[in-house]
Amino acid sequence: MIKFGTLGAARITPLALLNPCAAEPRASVEVVAARSRTRAEAFAQAHQIPQVVDNYAEVIQHADVAAVYIPLPITQHHQWTIKALQAGKHVLCEKSFASNASEAEQMRDAARGTGLVLMDAYHYRYHPLFSRAREIYSAGLLGTIREVHAKFHVPVTDPKDIRMNYATGGGVTMDIGCYPISWVRHITASEPLSLTAAAVVGPPNVDVCLTTRMTLPGDIVATTSGDMRAAAAFVATIEVIGDLGRMLVNNPIAPHMGNSLTLTLQHAEPSVEHFSRRPTYSYQLDAFLNAIEAGQPVLTDANDAVAQMRVIDQCYKAAGLPIRGLAL
């Protein structure tokens, strides 16, 4: 059994780690620390975590812990990932992986040569819905691809939300808009040759909406949109247009809440497929455990994390905003 330690009591932790581990005999969550011991004890009691320690350092040094989950504010991912790797622990790091590409490169370099798994937690990538979309794309059913459009919009109404604070790595592109960027990169298996971006700024230097237009190899035009303005309506879609047809992927972010893939080819009626309601996070846990136990490669490894952060850095530069993690 792979025993996890988790850093912090973040809201995402039950969905991303605790629930998948509860249904997985190969894994358990053994240890937690949080900003205060009181907070950690309350979280442990609520989620049946056996051990509470005083601080994050004790988690990564804990003899029972083989893997560390890092859902901390993005500005803390770099230091704690490197410390956990140096302590001999595998790391599952929440997205965005780092504040910027430079930090991501240092995290990747720390993992090299250790034999340890360092995984960027883009959970959608492991679900059958996205795997099928990628299969259709690469099979050529849509002909020559002309356009890819990816959107993820979720309203954030609390002005004190951590995503509204530049100092903690805030900005829609770091938390919401990073997904459409990743969807485009992964479905096309390519990186942008050029990129323009436009942002709506809320709190100082914090993008609350950011759109991009990318040129990809093969003269493909891709657009992405991330929006966390209070009035935003939920949408999570990927649209791919080729000269032989169109594919629409609905809800790649949370397919356990419902999903569909609609394929519309020339001279044919649209076909609609639905996929497993098993959570994306459970598939992600499978991949992480298989990497630890059997050395299987992960689809969102540290190299991919570096490439993802390079595109995010480009987005901020193109939109005239500072790269996250830089002192202002």
Image (cartoon, rainbow, N blue to C red):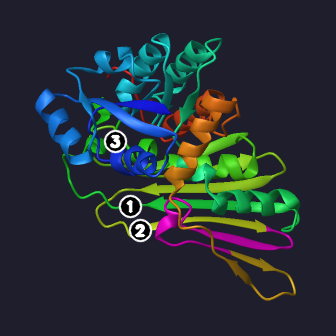
- Of badges 2 and 3, nearer the viewer stands 2
Marker disc for residue 206? 3
Relative to 283, is 108 above or below? above
- Which kind of residue does numbered mark 2 sit on? Phe
In the image, what residue occupies the spot 69% across and 80% down? 272
Q: Nearer the viewer, residue 283 or 233?
A: 283
Identify which residue, 75 or 310, lies in the foreground.
75
Q: Secondary structure at mark 2?
A: loop
Q: Residues within 10 Å of mark 1 (few under 14, many from 20)?
A: some
Q: Amino acid at mark 1?
A: Val
Distance (Cα) linking label 2 and label 1: 5 Å
Residue 258 belongs to the span the image colors magenta: yes
Task: Find residue 19 and report its horizontal and vertical position in percent.
Answer: 39, 51
Relative image position of residue 57 (x, y in whole percent): 31, 15
* 284 sits left or right of 79 in the view: right
Count of numbered badges drawn on the protein: 3
Q: Residues within 10 Å of mark 3 (few under 14, many from 20)?
A: many
What's drawn in magenta, residue-wise?
A: 242-261
Residue in the foreground of this view, choosing between 135 and 293: 293
Q: Is residue 6 or residue 306 the one in the foreground?
A: 6
The answer to whether any part of residue 71 appears in the image is: no
Residue 52 vertical placement versus 107 (above, below): below
